[in-house]
Image: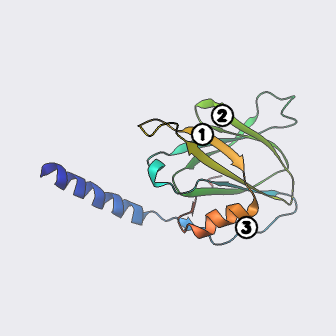
C-alpha cells in the first residue's frame, strides 16, 4: 500500500512538473538568412527510451577538419525525448558528438542559405536493460517535417546563447 501511494504521489508530481515547464511546439520552419545555414537536430519521441537524456556537443572548425584537430565548442545541447534544436550557423565544418563519448561523432559541412536536418537516434542490441548506442544521421527535409509535424510531440530546446 505504501509503495502504491508513493508511486501515485510521484506520478502526480511528475505531471505537475511537466505542465509547469513552457515548451515551444514546432509550428513551421524558420525563415532562411542568406548569410547563415539553418540547422535542425531532432530527437523523436520514443516511449521505450524516454528516460534517457543526452548532451550533444556541437563544435565548429576554424578551417578544414583535416588540418585542424581541436575544433572550438560552439554549443552544448541537452536533447530530451521528443525535443529538437534549431539555430543559425555560419558556413563551415562542424562536428557533433555525444558528451563524454568520443566513439561516436559526425563531421559535416554547412553552406549558407541552406537548411540541414539531422536526427539523433538510439539503438539497443538486446531487449534487456542496456544503454543504447548513439547514432546521428542527416535526413531529408520532407522526413524531418513529417517527424516535426505528425508526432505533435516535438518541442524546441531553448537556445541559450
Mark 3 Cα shell of 10 Å, populated few (<14), some (14-19), many (≥20): few
Q: Who is closer to the viewer here, 17 or 149? A: 149
Q: CA distance from mark 3 to mark 1?
A: 27 Å
Please give left or right for residue 10 compared with residue 115 in the image.
left
Residue 5: x and y in percent read 17, 55
Classify mark 1: helix, strand or loop: strand
Mark 1 Cα shell of 10 Å, populated few (<14), some (14-19), many (≥20): some
Q: Which residue is mark 2?
A: 104
Q: Earlier in the sequence, mark 2 or mark 1?
A: 2
At 68% from the left and 61% from the top, the residue drawn is: 144
Please give left or right for residue 85 compared with residue 107 in the image.
left
Q: Who is closer to the viewer here, 125 or 118? A: 125
Residue 9: x and y in percent read 23, 57
Single out the residue that lies furthest toward the left.
Answer: 1
Q: Who is closer to the viewer here, 53 or 47? A: 47
> Residue 30 bears which disc, if any?
3
Q: Which residue is mark 1?
A: 134
How many marks are shown on the rendered structure?
3
Classify mark 3: helix, strand or loop: loop
Name the mark nearer the viewer: 3 or 1: 1
Residue 128 sits in quarter: top left
Single out the residue that lies furthest toward the front.
Answer: 126
> Residue 12 bears which disc, if any?
none
Q: Earlier in the sequence, mark 2 or mark 3?
A: 3
Please give left or right for residue 113 compared with residue 23 in the image.
right
Say if 150 sits above or below 116 in the image: below
Residue 4: x and y in percent read 18, 53
Amino acid at each position: 500500500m505504501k509503495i502504491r501511494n508513493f508511486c501515485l504521489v510521484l506520478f502526480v508530481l511528475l505531471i505537475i512538473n511537466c505542465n509547469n515547464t513552457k515548451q515551444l511546439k514546432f509550428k513551421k520552419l524558420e525563415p532562411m538568412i542568406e548569410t547563415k545555414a539553418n540547422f535542425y537536430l531532432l530527437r523523436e519521441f520514443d516511449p521505450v527510451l524516454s528516460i534517457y537524456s543526452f548532451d550533444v556537443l556541437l563544435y565548429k572548425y576554424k578551417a578544414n577538419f583535416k588540418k585542424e584537430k581541436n575544433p572550438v565548442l560552439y554549443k552544448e545541447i541537452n536533447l530530451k525525448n521528443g525535443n529538437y534544436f534549431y539555430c543559425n550557423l555560419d558556413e563551415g565544418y562542424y562536428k557533433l558528438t555525444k558528451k563524454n563519448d568520443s566513439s561516436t561523432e559526425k563531421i559535416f559541412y554547412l553552406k549558407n542559405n541552406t537548411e540541414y536536418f539531422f536526427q539523433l537516434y538510439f539503438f539497443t542490441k538486446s531487449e534487456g536493460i542496456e544503454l543504447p548506442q548513439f547514432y546521428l544521421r542527416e535526413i531529408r527535409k520532407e522526413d524531418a517535417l513529417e517527424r516535426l509535424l505528425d508526432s505533435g510531440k516535438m518541442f524546441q530546446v531553448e537556445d541559450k546563447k
